[in-house]
Amino acid sequence: MFTGLVEALGIVRAISPEGDSCRLQVAVPPAFLEAASPEKRLGDSVAINGCCLTVVAADVRIATNETLWSFQAGHETLARTNLGRLQIGDAVNLERAMPANGRFGGHIVQGHVDGVGKVAVIAQRGDWSDYTFEVPEHLAAQMVEKGSITVDGVSLTLTKVDQTRFQVMLIPHTLAVTTLGQRKVGDEVNLETDVLAKYVQKLMSRGSVAGGSE
């Protein structure tokens, strides 16, 4: 599980096709490595732009003194996320999986991307920005104003929601330390709706009543 609080930005250094899947090699910044446990090992989970992936290799590039972590993205991941559109040199949001004794600072984020949205409008409000995203209607149905949404792995509060769009307000810190500050109108972003909303929607669609039948 994750919380949607991005810890650092990584840089894509290599993209290698593997059939209908691919392998991503990401340069991990020193600050992120220092925050990670010393025994960081293969098989650990890391959210890349909000998508939970597994560390399958770790190397050090001596020429540039970079630590490189490799991740495999399967065809399902590439079909549901923007990871298949990444290019070498792109920045990505990084978050380690939350430890059982960790501080829960964002909201419940599974790292299971539900779909892709697009930046529709960016409106500046001084140092702040209002971002409006176009979103598939079935995902908008799982959103409510003042509820939570994960955009490229960033936990945000919904300020407006309609049938095919939603809006969030980004503070200067979020714009500076995540990829959202680099997004432009038309860019695609990964979306994960609140898991609680999904369960409620499922129960309502089945006509279930809390507490069982009388």
Image: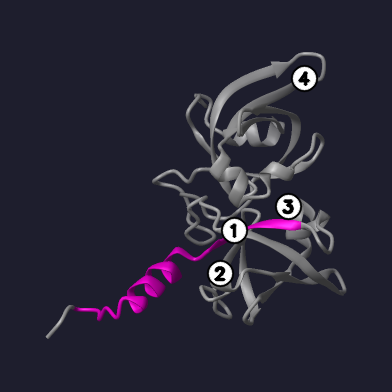
Residue displayed at 63% across by 31% down: 22
Residues packed near mark 2 inside 10 Å, few (<14), some (14 to 19) or many (20 plus):
many
Residue displayed at 81% across by 20% down: 64
198 magenta-colored:
yes
Residues packed near mark 4 inside 10 Å, few (<14), some (14 to 19) or many (20 plus):
few
Q: Quadrant of residue 59?
A: top right
Q: Which residue is mark 1?
A: 115
Amino acid type, residue under disc 3 in the picture: Thr
Q: Which residue is mark 4?
A: 65
Contact check, label 4 and label 1, Cβ < 8 Å = no
Please tell me which of labels 1 and 3 falls first in the chain: 1
- On screen, residue 20 versus residue 203, left or right, reads right
Contact check, label 2 and label 1, Cβ < 8 Å = yes
Residue at the farthest top position: 62
Q: CA distance from mark 3 to mark 2?
A: 23 Å
The secondary structure type at the circle numbered 3 is loop
Residue displayed at 83% across by 64% down: 185
Contact check, label 4 and label 3, Cβ < 8 Å = no
Which mark identifies residue 178? 3
Residues packed near mark 1 inside 10 Å, few (<14), some (14 to 19) or many (20 plus):
some
Please tell me which of labels 3 and 2 falls first in the chain: 2
Q: CA distance from mark 1 to mark 3?
A: 19 Å
Which mark identifies residue 174? none
Q: Is residue 70 visible?
A: yes
Amino acid type, residue under disc 2 in the picture: Leu
Q: CA distance from mark 2 to mark 4?
A: 42 Å
Magenta span of residues: 188-211
Q: Quadrant of the C terminus?
A: bottom left
